[in-house]
Amino acid sequence: MRNWKIAPQDPTVARFIDCYWFLEKTEDDIGPDYPKLNPDPAGHIILADSAQSYQYQSESFKAQGVGCHFIYPHSKTLVMDHSQPFLVVGIKFHVGTLYSLRSPHSELAIDKIIDSKAVLSFDSEQIVTDMSRSPEEHRDHFDGLLEPFLRNPYEDKHSDLVRKVIPIFLGTPLSDLGIELGFSQRTIERSFVRVTGFTLKQYDAMLRLERLLDHVHRLDSSELEWADIALQFGFSDQSHLVRYLKGAIGSTPGRYAKYRDLAIDAYGDFE
């Protein structure tokens, strides 16, 4: 697969957009036809040709259509249909961005995938049909398109607080966030749910899953010592890790090691 990922350069855009990315699968590429997309507290706009189909499915959810679409932050692992060649360009938001881009009195949405024509103010067809540009040229083009849209976001005390939580989250125990920021734990939790749609524990679980799968993905099957990995990532023992992965991605460690069907290299998560 061909891919690239690049961060925005414009400071206004960089406050809200994590990266732009590109992914292409040709007929000759070898990989899972139905990879799984990890739970993700951010959101993505996916730009694709108007005739290109997409499908995402979980145990209780299914979305399918053609062309450009908007993947909202989602709490469940989604199975994607990558059985046919495809080419997509993505815009990945920072966690909490959608709160600042919605109307002040509208409800924050999660676990949804919708046609993105209603939210796009530029010609996406031209972008996906002209992939001769360098990643830097695409970045500059996207920055120019998005800067006017992001110039006057909706922000309040809740988004301000969450913007302070995100940078220190990984290095701070959940119980110490209030001490670190000078707010009560209840205040932080309330603002975090309001802005992201997820509790602090849900967000922590998503980050831990991402780190765990990224670590496993970089190892050969012969290097996988699941008991050691369980301890490294805070599980009481290997059986605890097995139950966790089964619930989170529908796979045991052994099955994942065999099929490697998580989309570590897709949707903005590749190196």
Image: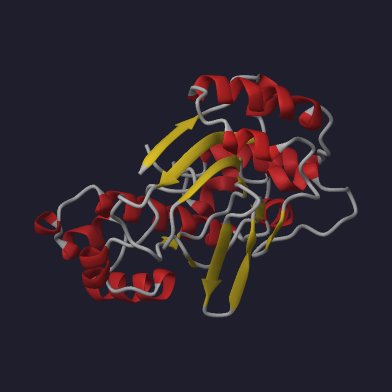
Query: Residue 251: x percent and y percent?
Result: 33, 73
Q: Which residue ends up furthest to the right in the rendered image?
A: 105
**Quadrant position of residue 160:** top right
Query: Residue 224: x percent and y percent?
Result: 15, 58
Query: Residue 200: x percent and y percent?
Result: 58, 57
**Quadrant position of residue 83:** bottom left
**Residue, x 56% and y 46% (percent of image)?**
177
Check the picture and name the quadrant holding the C terminus.
top left
Q: Which residue ends up furthest to the bottom in the rendered image?
A: 60
Does residue 31 appear to the left or right of 151 in the view shown?
left
Check the picture and name the quadrant holding the N terminus.
top left
**Residue, x 74% and y 42% (percent of image)?**
159
Does residue 53 appear to the left or right of 126 in the view shown?
left
Does residue 42 appear to the left or right of 224 in the view shown?
right
**Residue, x 18% and y 64% (percent of image)?**
226
Query: Residue 138: x percent and y percent?
Result: 57, 25
The vertical placement of 102 against 9, above or below, is below
Describe the colour scheme in one phrase.
Answer: secondary structure
The vertical placement of 53 against 47, above or below, is below
Toward the viewer: 104 or 218?
Answer: 218
Q: How many marks?
A: 0
Toward the viewer: 144 or 52?
Answer: 52
**Residue, x 34% and y 76% (percent of image)?**
243
